[in-house]
Amino acid sequence: MLEKTFYKTLLSRSFTFPVKVVYWDGKSAVYGNGEPEVTIIFKEKIPIREVTKNASIAFGEAYTNGKVEIEGSVQKLVASAFQTAGSFMRDNKFRKFIPKQNHSEKKSQSDVQSHYDVGNDFYKLWLDDTMTYSCAYFTDGNHDDLTKAQVDKVHHILKKLDPKPGKTLLDIGCGWGTLMLTAAKEYGLKVTGVTLSEEQYHFVSDRIKNEGLEDMAEVRLIDYRELGEQTWDYITSVGMFEHVGKENLGLYFKDVRHYLKNDGVALIHGITRQQGGALNAWIDKYIFPGGYVPGLAEMIGHIEENNMQIADVEMLRRHYQRTLEIWDDNFNAHRVEIKNMMGERFTRMWDLYLQACAASFESGNIDVIQYLITKGPSGKNLPTTRDYMFK
């Protein structure tokens, strides 16, 4: 009886639309007025102490393990929870308590490999042809296909640098290499990419060799902190700073400044919370160990503290929502293959991860932001208007 009262109180105030809940004893209730749009089915009781300790982990594990089923859109349900002031997803009591994380070079390599070395065959099933695992850029609303949007994102980033052929580019966290190789092939830049993922390293190495780019591009399997005294004219870093941890963000920007030549330009692209930094315990435990999403003011503070200046800032929240929705559609189109490859529990976990992240962007809980920064006076060597970015 206590559990029912607890869940009624919790769930009745957590959503912006009517939701049906089927409890572990077979009894059901509808919270909200009207026809329920989503049904939550508890196959087992989740102890109150687990929910109150950490609702994200409690519900995430219950869904992953099949103890909770959701009929209808998970994304819509989670987005609604983020938008509801009284929801368990909006409990701010512990937001300022961000536990210290170990981000030694050995731990960083382990964290990265636990996510990105799941296997190229797995990622090929649901990413686009460019193998780009970051926010796309949709120039035609929802009409662009994902491959075009990812290619457009790469060009959008590189154009912001106003790059000159023959100059040098460092790509910190190069992924499967599309940005760095586009910079070499189409912009005439001499490019260095770095990654801690062995799968990505071998993939990019093969691409460089197969495309005959050995004189223009190299990839290194190395921690970005170990690049020594070499400097570059431009730096790009896409979806990377979320991995360095709260305590290392200042050092990350210190290294960006160190690796930039005087008057150099960097484009730093990553997930940021406009409301302040946070981490999600379930994602940290199961998806991105060691991850941390910084706040906007926090990011700007680190840029300023390291004597760099901001030339441009652009928010791409809706673009990442759309990217994740397409990824999840692709994921579920190959669900049987993924289940056979990775197992039922993994499949449920990643489907939840993709939909929950889409919901988080949809609700404005998180954003993705591009920071164009300079080592030297803001925009000194850039055009005086933003028009050059779109030519």
Image (cartoon, rainbow, N blue to C red):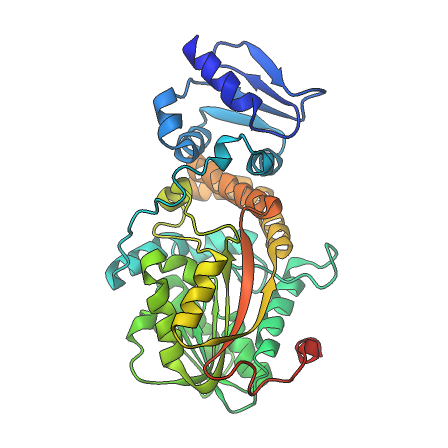
Question: Is residue 132 depicted above or below 25 in this figure?
Answer: below
Q: Percent x, y for residue 165?
A: 56, 90
Residue at figure coordinates x 69%, y 20% from the top left: 33
Farthest residue to the bottom: give it. 166
Residue 128 vs residue 71, the one in the foreground: 71
Quarter that holds the C terminus: bottom right
Task: Tell me if 61 is positioned left or right of 318 in this view.
Answer: left
Q: Split into 4 quadrants, where in the image is the N terminus? A: top left
Q: Is residue 110 above or below residue 338?
A: below
Question: Which residue shows up at 57% across the image and 19% down it?
Answer: 21
- Viewer can see residue 372: yes
Q: Is residue 212 above or below residue 337?
A: below
In this view, 61 is above or below 112: above
Q: Percent x, y for residue 134?
A: 53, 59
| Image location of residue 268, percent across then percent down | 49, 69
Residue closer to the observer: 389 or 25: 389
x, y percent for residue 174: 45, 69
In the image, what residue occupies the spot 41% across and 43% down?
A: 95
Instruction: Please identify the quarter of the rendering in which residue 161 is found.
Output: bottom right
Residue 329 visible to an observer of this rendering: no
The total number of labels drawn is 0
Q: Quadrant of residue 73?
A: top right
User: 330 or 248, which is in the foreground?
Assistant: 248
In-image side of 12 versus 209 (left or right): right
